[in-house]
Amino acid sequence: MSSYETLTLEVADYVATVTLNRPPVNAMNLAMRQEIVRAFDELHDREDVRAVVLTAQGKAFCAGADLKERPNIAGEPGAYPRHNRLTRAVFDSVMECGKPVIAAVNGLGIGAGCVLALCADIILVAEDSYLAMTEVDVGLAGGVRHVLRHLGQSDARLMIYTARRFSGPDLLRMGAASLCLPRDALLAEAQKIGREIAGKVPLAVQAAKKSFQVTEYMPLHEGYRFEQSQTVALASTEDTQEAWKAFAEKRKPVFKGR
């Protein structure tokens, strides 16, 4: 098991729980960026993990980029390209993880913290949580494309242009979150969903996530053709055969991930 300084990683019942843990507000510094990438790359390959819950310790989910680092990189040639590349890698590592990721947004998610939540496959929010893109308040810009994946055109612009806080109930109403729950019920529900996913045919779930990734910007016809190719590939796998047999025999299937 890998050790981390800015987060914790625990696995139970095929569900990994990644908890950001950099008090007081889980601001994203260089070390946290590197560790998020390392953790999700690890989870991508682990056979004992079939779903991932992403949450945070304390009352904040992630307050965004640690602005204390900005003065240190602004005058260093090459520093911003490196910073931007690693920032993209953080978000890519969550989106490209082969296992579905469930964000349990337990508190504020600002800037990069908001985008991090939006990179998850399924988003649950606490009733007293909120997401905000405050870049315009500090003379920066970013996150537009990620916000547009989840919010409608008008709401996305409202979030970006005004830096307003969108509360848990707001996010549920706008369709950006699947559930809005009391904070003390959030993690348990996210892990419950993770266990439900873990009980399905692992390769089929991974194929479904790949279909979401690949077909997001494809035309309907080409996207569905890709999905059909995934189904054809799955049909001959051991787990799919086991699922069919278990259904016919009215018993619980036993999946091996192959």
Image (tube, helix red, strand yellow):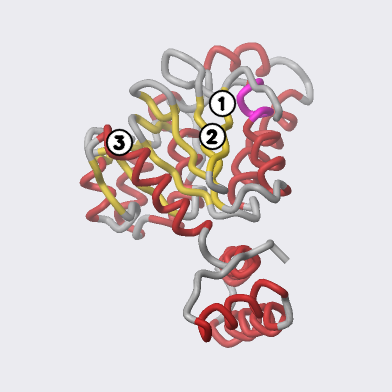
Would you say residue 213 is visible in this rendering?
no
Q: Which mark is residue 163?
A: none
Q: Kindly identify the amino acid type of the residue bearing the numbered disc 2.
A: Val
- Tell me whether circle 1 and circle 2 mark residues in contact (CB < 8 Å): yes
Q: Is residue 142 above or below residue 60?
A: below
Segment colored magenta: 31-35
Taking depth in this image into account, of 156 and 182 the one nearest to the observer is 182
Q: Residues within 10 Å of mark 1 (few under 14, many from 20)?
A: some
Q: Is residue 1 toward the left or the right of residue 121 in the image?
A: right
Q: Percent x, y for residue 143?
A: 49, 43
Q: Percent x, y for residue 13?
A: 53, 46
Q: Is residue 59 toward the left or the right of residue 167 in the image?
A: right
Q: Earlier in the sequence, mark 1 or mark 3?
A: 1
Q: In the structure shown, which secondary structural element does the residue marked by tag 2 occupy?
A: strand
Q: Quadrant of the C terminus?
A: bottom right
Q: Earlier in the sequence, mark 2 or mark 3?
A: 2
User: Residue beneath label 3, please?
Assistant: 130
Q: Between tags 1 and 3, which lies in front?
A: 1
User: Residue beneath label 2, please?
Assistant: 18
Q: Percent x, y for residue 99?
A: 60, 54
Q: CA distance from mark 2 to mark 3?
A: 20 Å
Q: Is residue 163 above or below residue 21?
A: below
Quarter where residue 88 is shown: top right
Quarter where residue 243 is shown: bottom right
Q: Residues within 10 Å of mark 3 (few under 14, many from 20)?
A: many
Taking depth in this image into account, of 58 and 221 the one nearest to the observer is 58
- Tell me whether circle 1 and circle 3 mark residues in contact (CB < 8 Å): no
Q: Kindly identify the amino acid type of the residue bearing the numbered disc 1.
A: Thr
Taking depth in this image into account, of 177 and 241 the one nearest to the observer is 241
